[in-house]
Image (cartoon, helix red, strand yellow):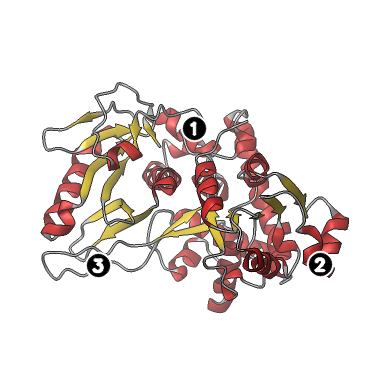
Amino acid sequence: MLERIVEDVVRDRLRTHGAVLLEGPKAVGKTTTALRLAASAVRLDRDAPARQAAQVDPDLVLDGAPPRLVDEFQLAPGLWNAVRGRVDDTRAKGLYLLAGSATPADEPTSHSGAGRIARVSMRTLTFFERGLASGRTSLRALFAGTTPTPDAERMGVREVVRHLAAGGWPANIDLGVDDALDANAEYLHAIVHVDLPRVDGVRRDPDELTRLVRGFARNVATDASLAAIALAGETSASVNTRTDHARALGRLYLIEDQPAWSPRLRSRIRLAATPKRHLADPSLAVAAVGATPERLLSSEIEWTGFLFESQVVHDLRVLAQPLRAEVRFYRDNKGLEVDAIVEHRDGRWLAVESKLGAGRIDEGATHLLALRDKLDAATAARCVGLVVVAADTPTYTRPDGVLVTSLASLGP
């Protein structure tokens, strides 16, 4: 059974909140992880009598040893408020662990669980969790001010691309690449034809949905507008329809935006505000366009660089969770862009450039140093590191202070 980085985050939130909501796409391992942490459980997707009882009276499924897992809680309207009420009445911590693969029609944030229910995102497996990275370049150690020692750990570009295309889905971990590609294609087909119609009961054209997902795939790791995404997917849907489609994909956690960073600068440079686009796992982008590792390494090589960036951002998001840090990006109107800014809640930050090929490491380092030079003194002083993450490179520190490391070395 795979140990997940998010487990410590859930344990921490159970100590501070009455309930924890573990949310994320289907098949990322939420139920398996939650069962490891729960003392009792009810699974509404598998237990029809329990689901029917919960739909009549949500309190009927809430009794059990804490923390009690209520899996796919969104299938029973009213459960969110019932859990919130139990937490209010008892004022106890660690009572419930909710897991869900879709935001319910009665959006939880419309009845805030603030102070009662903590929300924790769960994503697909990182390279470290898949056993593909040593973890010698520790994100926690970097924030503690410790620079990793030189390390020969690296992974060839061809191997990185094969693992990226297969994806971080737990069910795929023992599959060969071709089988994983087939599984990912079936996953997308099921999402479009089965899960999206069920999420809110709205009938949507599956062909238009497929084209919109393809548009997101073509624009992964960019700040493309929804209009540009629709154009890339060759969808003819109206503005309102594609907005509705995108909202539905978000409710199933299939798309996840990366917000822009707004630091204090030395000059009045305009900063980007539009978020970057990512799918739940880069392998979904590969599946959406029907690509193969061979295509990614030949005719699609430029796009593969964006996929690699998305993989690095994905892994940083998972690694940053236990640190209470967020992953953003920087872009200004002078053309300077940095792929990821990992910002701790206390203001410390780490800047990361992703470069698939080792031949572009100098370019990444130049961007990082230029960013630091644009910041005011107080913001620059809170920088804990400048890092270029590549594929086929050992870990070392350049004379200018920029750390170069491999995705095969990055860990918690």
Q: Is residue 40 above or below residue 194?
A: above
Give the mark, 3 or 1, whose residue is nearer the N terminus: 1
Q: Nearer the viewer, mark 3 or mark 1?
A: 3
- Name the residue that disc number 2 marks: 55
Q: Residue at x 28, y 39 (%)?
A: 142
Q: CA distance from mark 3 to mark 1?
A: 35 Å
Labelled pair 3, 1 in contact (Cβ < 8 Å): no
Labelled pair 3, 2 in contact (Cβ < 8 Å): no
Q: Nearer the viewer, residue 184 or 88?
A: 88
Q: Could you tell me residue 77's position as x and y percent?
A: 74, 69
Q: Could you tell me residue 8's position as x and y percent?
A: 51, 42
- Name the residue that disc number 3 marks: 271
- Residue 269 circle label: none
- Name the residue that disc number 1 marks: 162
Judging from the image, what secondary structure is the residue with disc 3 in? loop
Q: CA distance from mark 3 to mark 2?
A: 47 Å
Labelled pair 1, 2 in contact (Cβ < 8 Å): no
Identify which amino acid the numbered label 3 is placed on: Leu
Judging from the image, what secondary structure is the residue with disc 2 in? helix
Give the mark, 3 or 2, whose residue is nearer the N terminus: 2
Q: Could you tell me residue 248's position as x and y percent?
A: 61, 66
Horizontally, is 313 left or right of 250 in the view?
A: left
Mark yes or no: residue 356 visible. Answer: no
Q: Quadrant of the C terminus?
A: top left
Q: Residue at x 62, y 35 (%)?
A: 172
Q: Residue furthest top?
A: 152
Q: Residue at x 16, y 54 (%)?
A: 380
Identify which amino acid the numbered label 1 is placed on: Arg
Identify which amino acid the numbered label 2 is placed on: Gln
Q: Residues within 10 Å of mark 3 (few under 14, many from 20)?
A: some
